[in-house]
Amino acid sequence: MAKQYDVLFRLLLIGDSGVGKTCLLCRFTDNEFHSSHISTIGVDFKMKTIEVDGIKVRIQIWDTAGQERYQTITKQYYRRAQGIFLVYDISSERSYQHIMKWVSDVDEVGDAASPPVGGGERVPQREGEARARLNASRNPCLPQPWGTRLMRSRNGRWGESKGSSWLRSMAWTFMKQVPAPTSTLKR
Ligand SMILES: Nc1nc2c(ncn2[C@@H]2O[C@H](COP(=O)(O)OP(=O)(O)OP(=O)(O)O)[C@@H](O)[C@H]2O)c(=O)[nH]1
């Protein structure tokens, strides 16, 4: 049977419990939103295949539990990921400040970029979105928020633009050993 994709990317979502990681993933893969919060237990994953410049890219996204008690399990997935999304709730300064902690967890197993730094408590949605854009523009290591585009590697475009205005959560990814898509293409 013909291979259903040319290149596979393994990506990971991390961040505090309740910031919207599972929702972000459901919106991306199934275009669905669930208002209930059922905490992820350990890890879960979803896949989606998209076509970029004629290349079939299969994206396998691992959704991790934000709760502390699962971290021994979830950390085991960091090393195998080619990209990691740091997710926070733009209406919660606390979840944003915790991004530092998530980055240092990732640092323990590989490369990481410096996250933006903040202060304060509850942040109004518009301000949170504006800050997210500003932080992304200030730090070239952190690509644009999810609402603008999914991912962009240093070697060129291979992600998909996916605007979701309803999203409070913003995600960034920083690249770790991302291969140029062409190097892994089926010939
Ligand atoms: N209003 C609003 N609510 C959201 C949004 N994203 C997620 N939520 C809500 O936030 C809650 C938590 O969402 P989840 O996606 O389950 O959070 P999570 O980060 O996966 O949580 P853990 O699995 O515990 O780590 C749910 O009640 C969602 O409905 C959003 O963009 N807007």
Image (cartoon, rainbow, N blue to C red):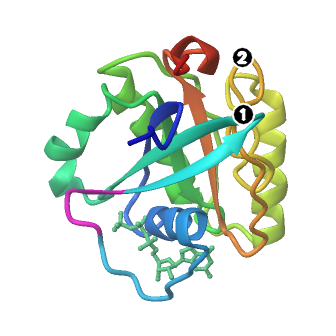
Circles 1 and 2, Cβ within 8 Å, touching? The answer is no
**Magenta-colored span:** 40-45
Residue found at x 41% / y 39%: 102
| Image x and y of residue 96, in percent | 56, 51
| Image x and y of residue 9, in percent | 48, 34
Seen in the image, is 168 located left or right of residue 99? right
Real-space Cα separation, disc 1 to disc 2, in angstroms: 10 Å
SS at circle 2: loop
Quadrant assignment, res 164: bottom right
In the picture, the quarter occupied by the C terminus is top right
Which residue was labeled with disc 1?
143
- Which circle, 1 or 2, is nearer the viewer? 2
Residue found at x 71% / y 17%: 154
Seen in the image, is 154 located left or right of residue 95? right
Classify 141 as above or below 36: above
Q: How many marks?
A: 2
Q: Amino acid at mark 1?
A: Pro
Residue found at x 84% / y 33%: 137
Residue 41 located within the stretch drawn in magenta: yes
SS at circle 1: loop
| Residue toward you, 48 or 142 | 48
Q: Which mark is residue 154?
A: 2
Whichever of callouts 1 and 2 sits on the residue coming sooner in the sequence is 1
| Residue toward you, 89 or 3 | 3
